[in-house]
Image (cartoon, rainbow, N blue to C red):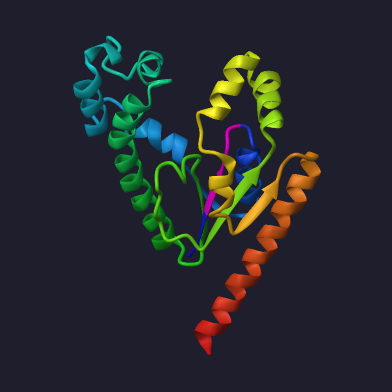
Amino acid sequence: MYLIGLTGGIASGKSTVARRLYEHGAVHIDADDLARRVVEPGKPALAAIAEEFGPGVLRHDGSLDRAKLGELVFGDDEARARLNAIVHPAVRELSGRLIAKAEQEDPDAVVVYDVPLLVEASVDHPFDLVVVTSAPRRTQVKRLVEERGLDPIQAEARVDAQADNAARLAIADVVIDTDGTLAHTMSQTDALWHRIEEEQAGRSVGGRS
């Protein structure tokens, strides 16, 4: 198995790169999706959140009221740290199981673990490659305003709430510049896939020799 950690700031083109790698045949595991799954009704993480932040963060049907929880933790570093201490270990455990399942089903699989908080959450899976999508702050803010309907102040706050891009670039094996055209992003991603195929072929030759 070849395991890629894919990360990048909000609106930095990460989903576009993940989708292209999936089109090439990679198994895509989305950390945001896992973060939603681990707080579904009946899951231990949801019970822990309700105990930590009070029953007011639950809807009448027992599901998580994300807006209420967001009000409590946004802008409060200490509260967000308490939430992350519950959610991040649960996501790590589930992602570990899904990565192992992908390898069991296909020992030659290329798995892309798409994880926005790879730096912040100290994700420590044994990645063969860490790929970072990178766009200037002004581009991220512009995309959030134009594509997701945020007002500029909200957009700037969302970008600034994440890790500084320098922290991501410091751990990158490959940086994909997404500030240009979509075609430019795709061509870089295609080149990355070609590199992975070559590395896998080299492993196979090495394994047989």
The image quadrant of residue 180 is top right
Q: Which residues are magenta?
A: 5-10
Residue drawn at (65%, 16%) of the image = 152
Please provide percent x and percent y for residue 132: 60, 49
Along the line of sight, the residue nearer the viewer: 88 or 102: 88
The image quadrant of residue 66 is top left
**Is 112 rendered above or below residue 14?**
below
> In terms of secondary structure, what is the magenta stretch mainly?
strand
As for residue 138 lying within the magenta part, the answer is no
Residue drawn at (80%, 44%) of the image = 183
Can residue 37 be seen here? The reply is yes
Residue drawn at (39%, 34%) of the image = 35
Tally the numbered discs. 0
Can residue 150 be seen here? The reply is no
Along the line of sight, the residue nearer the viewer: 179 or 170: 170
Residue drawn at (26%, 27%) of the image = 46
**Is 41 rendered above or below residue 185?**
above
Please provide percent x and percent y for residue 169: 59, 50
Along the line of sight, the residue nearer the viewer: 149 or 94: 149
As for residue 9 lying within the magenta part, the answer is yes
Please provide percent x and percent y for residue 88: 34, 39
